[in-house]
Every structure is written in structure tokens, then in C-alpha cells.
Amino acid sequence: MDNIHVLIVDDEEDLAKTIAERLEIRGIHTQTASDGDKALNLIKSQPPDVVVLDLMMPGIGGLGILKQINLLENKIPVILLTGYGSRERSIEGMNLGAFDYVLKPCNLDDLIIKIQEAIKIK
Amino acid sequence: MKTIKFQEFITKYIFRIPEEGTSPERYKALRRNIIILMILVTVIPLSLMATINYYQYQKNLRDEIISPMNLLTNKTKRSFELFLEERLSTVRFIASAYSYQELSDPIILNHILSVLKREFDGFVDLGLISSKGKLLNYAGPYSFLDKDYSQQSWYHKVLINGRYISDVFLGYREFPHIAIAVQNLTEPNCCWILRTTINTKKFDDLIAMLELDPECDAFLINKEGILQTNSKFYGKVLEPCQLKIPNGGQGTYVIESQDKNGREIFIAYSYLVEPEYTLVVVKPSSLILKTWFTFRTEIFFIYIASVLLIVLLVYKLTDAQVSHIKKADEKRERAFRELEHSQKLSSIGRLAAGVAHEINNPLAIINQKAGLMSDLIENTPDFNKKQKFIELTEAIIKSTERCSTITHRLLGFARRMDIEYEDLGVNDVLREVISFLEKEALHRNIKIELHLDENLPRVSSDRGQLQQVFLNILSNAFAAVTDNGNIIIRTWDEDSEKVGISFEDDGCGMSQKDLANIFEPFFTTKKGYGTGLGLPITYGIIQKMGGSIKVKSKLGEGSMFTIYILKMPKKVLDV
């Protein structure tokens, strides 16, 4: 669990921060970003091991960010955070190379398992 | 005073079609009206034509009979007149050409008679009568010399008119004769009379010239209705005629009558002026009307056959037409209802999706916050009521999970997941679902009877969707039956395209009213705990997979859901 860096991107800051705090409790270093620009800046300045990305966001949206991440030199696995209703979008996201997806509201343990899997693959 | 106008009457009583929907009364009325109208429109002109034809033909036939009869009678009458005229002229000529002295001479009188007999038909004798009525000279087969005629009526008529043609009488030889008498007025103060008797054989000849059919008759009668010639059917000469002929008038007439034997006859009659005879020609109508009866029978049968044909045709056509309309109406109604239903579903779906989506985020936050709370509590050393707090946060998390199931369902209802086709056995899916419900069945002692077709072909379908469909229907069945109830599940190979699955329960059943609503979203009979989404989702899934679902239910007796699933998907519908 040590030295895992996770970036949580969600426009619901409250949600992002809560998840971050819970992950911190479990010893996972976590940062949060509430929009695409901040997220991409953080990814460039302090590349995380895994990005947890909400798909429903204003601006360029989750898929936009995902495309940007894909453009980066060193691949960062992305776990999509999706609502049930945006299933098509999550499928599109998976096609764009996302590692996996988690349905909102998510079970934290599931999320952690998926984060660990993502790192293992990496 | 109120009068119903024709149009009003029509619309009120004939065109009155019940307005609403596809009720059988409406089609009955429609059918009745079309039939009435069509029959009226066709039968009225037909009847009119038949009637007009009937009368026209009758008239033509009558004219065809009457005019020749008229003509013939008239012609014959003229022949009679001519004959009599000729004879009268001859007698008058003799009376003028010869003097009293000459005529008194028996030799000359005999000579004249012999010339007359040679040149003209029918002269029998010739007599010279004095102004006192005494026969002075006579030439002929009988000897009436010195006979006194002064008391006889014809004698007086001659004195008045100067001439006289008698009715027919039987002479001494028992042959019918007529007498012609002419008064001579050329010699003053000496008005003697020349009288001749003429055999009426010529009358018979003239009648024979008519060339009548054996059933026909022709004869002469005098003013008193005494026959002047023999009649075939109505008496001998000098007997009263047994047929009543109207008196008076001039010219020729044709009347229809009945003789004493009840024969329908046409009578043509024509009056002669001098003597006052009536020529009568009789033709039985039966002879004439034979063609008429044939025609009438023909026209009658043609008419009846036509009407029958029309009625039959109208019935058949109208039946076909009305059932066609009915089908079209039903189809339209169904399409409309389906459209309405799907529109309702989709608008409710959108609303539900919107609500679910909006709720999902705060729900996620609550979930995470509660999670964080439980994390923090667990990482905190023991404190008062720590266990209680752990339980509370767990309860909150459980509740948010329950909420999320609901929102997922709502979203699922709005946008059903893509169907992922795989090769599967319907029986296996059924068993999986049943195993899921086994505990409840055991607990409530519900007997699930399986009649599964083990040779059921495998189908290409979506396992998850099918599970949901079966689960929804079975959940409803479980809710419907009482403890110790029965549920029977059957599967069978319906046809080359579909397999059938039925779920039968002996539960509470549904009323017709409820049955009409079960696929409506948010309609539920399970007051308090139903979402009203189970069957609409089921319906949606089945529709989307190209299958169909049927429900039979009777209140208090149970329900039966029958599902047909395509063996191979026809087309994949987009979400």
C-alpha cells in the first residue's frame, strides 16, 4: 500500500475529498482535483500511479481528460467512476483505454482492489 | 307542429353509429347501415326498372294486339258496309231505271232477277209492292203474290225513309236472309216499293275472310243484341248474343272483358250505320297473353334472382368491408395505445433518470462520508458507545446502498442496458432464478412445479435480462400466492422462431381493470411495498428482445404469464 499515489478527479469536491481521506487512512497518498485543468496540471507536475476519474463533469468532461492522459508519454492507468445512467460513456471510456470502472456510489474496498490491480498491471 | 326533416331522420335513425371506440355495436350499426344503403341504392333502381319494363311491355303488347284487331275489325266493317251499300244501290238503280209498268211485267222482273243473280251474289227474289202494301209482282222461288205488307213495321220505315235494310231473318228455306226495300219517288203520285231478299251467305264469307284462329270468334249483332250471323261460342243466328256489347258510338273500339265461361277476352266492335249492326270480333286474352305470361315469369325470376344476388353480394361485401374497417380500427387503436404507452414510458423514464442521476451524487457523498465516519471510529480507541456508532454508520451505508439499488433500477428502466447476446439454455436460467428464490419457497411452503422441455433448443439471448424477467414475474407470483400455494413453470418449443415459457400461479389473480394497467410504470397492487416498475421493465426487456408477453388472470383464481422468446435475435435495437 505504501507509496501509492492516487489522483481523484471529481467535480463534487466533497465526494473527492472524502474518498481521498478514506484512502489516506488506508495509507494511500491521495490528491484531488475538481476540474480537468487542475487534474492535468497535477498529473504533469506530480504524476500519480492511478487516476480515479469521474465521467460526468463540466468542461471537457471525464472523457476529455481521459484522452489527454492517453496523450502522455508514460501511461497512467485510469479507473472510471460512473453513474449507472452513463453506462454508454463508461463503455466508450473503456474503449479509450481506461483500466476499469466503478459504479457510483462505490464501495471503497472495491475501489482499493481495483487500484491495486491497476498498479500490478503497471 | 314539428316535422322531422328527411335528413334528420336519416342521421337520427339510420346513420346513428355509436361514437366511442371499437364496440361491437358500432360495427353492427355500421354494417346495418351500409347494407341498408347499398340494398336501397341497388334494389330501388332495379325495382323501378322492372316495374317500368313490366308496364311498358304490357302496354306494347296490348297495343300490338289492339291495333291489328282494331284495324281488322274496321276493315271488315267497311266490307260489310260496302256490300250492303252495293246491294242497296243496285236495288235503287233498278227502282229508278225501270218504270212501274216494266216492273209490273213478270217477264221483265224475272229477267232483272236473273241478271241480278248472275252479276251479284246473294239476290234471292225481287218483288214490287204497291203504295198500299200489296205485293203486285214477284220474281223468285216463292209465290207471295197479293200478300199484304201494309201492317209490317219495315213497310212503314220504307215509307218514312224511302229505303230499308232489314235485320236478318230466316226465310222460307230456313236460310238467313236480309231484305232490302226501296221506295220509288221518281214517278209522282205513284210511290211503289221494290223489295229484294238477299242471302246472307256473303256475311259468312266476309267473316271467313278475317282468317281467325280457332279460339277466336267474329259475328254481327243487331241493335237488340240478336245475332245476325252464326257465332262459334256465343249462339246461333237469330239467338240473343251471350256477350254484352256496349251500345252506341261510332268507329271501332277494343275492350277487355270476360265471357260467360270466364274466358278473358278482347272484344273489338264496330258499328255499322245502316243497318244498325255491330260487328264483333272476339279474341281470347290467353292466346295473346301467353307471351305476356312468359315475359312476366321471366322478368319476375330475373328480378328475384337479381335481388337475391345483390343481397348476398351486399352482405358478403359489407361483411368483408366492415371487418376490414374493424381490423384497421383495432390496428390503429393498438398502435395508438402502444405509442401512448411507449411515450409514457419514455417520458417517465426520462424523469426517473433525471431524478435518479441527481440523487446519485449526494447519495455517493453520504455513502463516502458514512464510510469515512466508520473508518474514523474504527481507528479511534474505545470510547463510549463506540459499538453503537459503528452500527449506526453501517446502517447509513446499507441505506445508501439500498437507495442506490433503487436509483439504478430507475436508471435501468430509463435506459435499459444493451442486450448482450449469448448462447444459453432457458431452462438453466430458470433454474438459477428458482434457486435464488428457493429459500423463500421453502419458508412459505410454496410448491414450484417444473414442466421443462428438456429438449428445448438453446437460444441466443441476454442472460442478465432473462434473469431479471424471470425474477420479476416469479416475484409477482410469490407475492400473489398464499403460503402453501402452487406455481407451475413450463417451457416448450413454440415454433421455428420462438420458445415459450409460462408461469402459472393459483394466487389472488387480478381484475380486468388491473390487468389493463400492469405494464404501466408505477402501477402497483402491492400497496406500500411495490415500486410499480417490475412488470414495465419486464415488458420493456421482452419487447426489446423481440419477444412477446401475454397475461391471463382471473380474480381469486390465479394468473398466468406466458413469454415468447426469439431463438435468434431479429435485430439489435439501439439503446
Image (tube, helix red, strand yellow):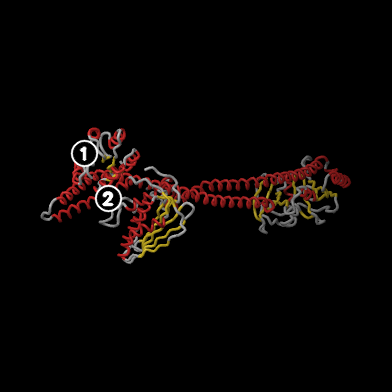
Relative to B374, is A4 above or below? above
User: Mark 2, mark 1: which one is toward the viewer?
Assistant: 1
Disc 1: host chain = A
Disc 2: host chain = B
Determine whether, in the image, residue A13 is placed left or right of residue B168: left
- Which quadrant of the view contains residue B241? bottom right
Circle 2 sits on which residue? B406
B375 or B199, which lies in front? B375
Residue B24 seen from this side: no
Determine whether, in the image, residue B239 is placed left or right of residue B48: right
The quadrant of the image that shows the C terminus of chain B is: top left
B397 or B515, which lies in front? B397
Determine whether, in the image, residue B383 is placed left or right of residue B364: left
Amino acid carrying label 2: it is Ile
B239 or B214, which lies in front? B214
Question: In the structure shown, which secondary structural element does the residue marked by tag 1 occupy?
Answer: strand
User: Local crowd at mark 2 within 10 Å, few (<14), some, or many (≥20)?
Assistant: some
